[in-house]
Image (cartoon, rainbow, N blue to C red):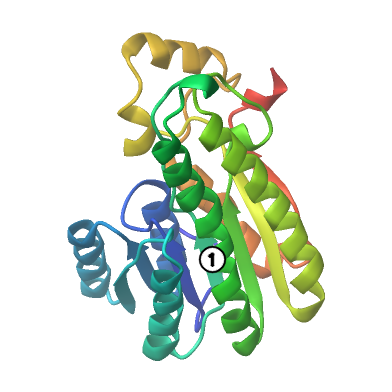
Amino acid sequence: MSVFDFSDKVALVTGGASGIGRACIEAFAAGGAKVVVADLNEAQGEALVAQLQADGVQAKFVAADVAAHEDVAAMVQSTLSQFGALHFAVNNAGVEGVRSAIAETDLDDWHRVININLNGVFYCMREEVPAILQSGGGAIVNMSSIMGSVSTPGISPYVAAKHAVLGLTKTAAQEYSAQGVRVNAVCPGFIETPLVLKHLTEEMRAQALAMHPIGHLGKAEEVADTVTFLCSQQASFVTGSAYSVDGGYLTI
């Protein structure tokens, strides 16, 4: 349950139909926001919106591929057409890619991961910033990762994109904070979402647990709590920052 008041505000979350994105949507909705679920999975997205609407939440689903600029532009325009404003945007959609060493990395996979995880964030901010300015200001949260600060073998496209997202976040914060758009990033550790769990064998899970001093993997709701804090008035002096939600992973 959100502890922040988002009454009369509009929040857009990419990759909003499942995992961390869904948790963010639910947290915004609990705070009273109108929400837009953007995702490629129409069945999951529509089902979530139907559930929210049944609970009295003003919600809309938009099918969007963040790697396609035209989809992103249509997504933001659809938000404005439906609700008349945009105050908060969470650029969360992402993929990991195929594990391989750099010299064996498939070029199509490199471009796919970079297009979604990096270009997608750029396309989103390019369209979201004017909409948020037009709406009187607000906040953007970009989803980076612990891999935005460190690395691990076999996922060079993902690591490169998540590092770059932090640079984009800092630049956007410098450019727009004085105009009323705060921009921050969140860097999750291993979170129990479908994207992470499908790759973890029992052995890998045990290894991951050992790298989190807190002693357990994270929950999507724990990431959403940080995201909604960064969009709230309680974070009114926070911009250009990267918040690790990683159970201590980066301390090792």
Query: In the picture shown, does residue 105 fall above or below 54?
Result: above
Measured as percent of width and height from the top left, residue 24 is found at 45, 57
Q: Residues within 10 Å of mark 1 (few under 14, many from 20)?
A: many
Query: In the picture shown, does residue 223 fall above or below 238?
Result: above
Measured as percent of width and height from the top left, residue 93 is found at 43, 53
Q: Three-letter amino acid code at disc 1?
A: Tyr
State the quadrant of the C terminus: top right
Can residue 118 be seen in the rendering of this structure?
yes
Measured as percent of width and height from the top left, residue 102 is found at 54, 23
- Residue 42 position by quadrant: bottom left
Q: Which residue is mark 1?
A: 123
For the point 72% across and 50% down, which residue is it? 167
Can residue 57 be seen in the rendering of this structure?
no
Residue closest to the far top? 203
For the point 42% across and 31% down, which residue is it? 106
Nearer to the camera, 215 or 176: 176
For the point 41% across and 68% down, which residue is it? 29
Query: In the picture shown, does residue 130 fall above or below 64?
Result: below
For the point 57% across and 82% down, which residue is it? 131
Per the image, label 1 sits on a secondary structure element best described as helix
Q: Is residue 113 left or right of residue 41?
A: right
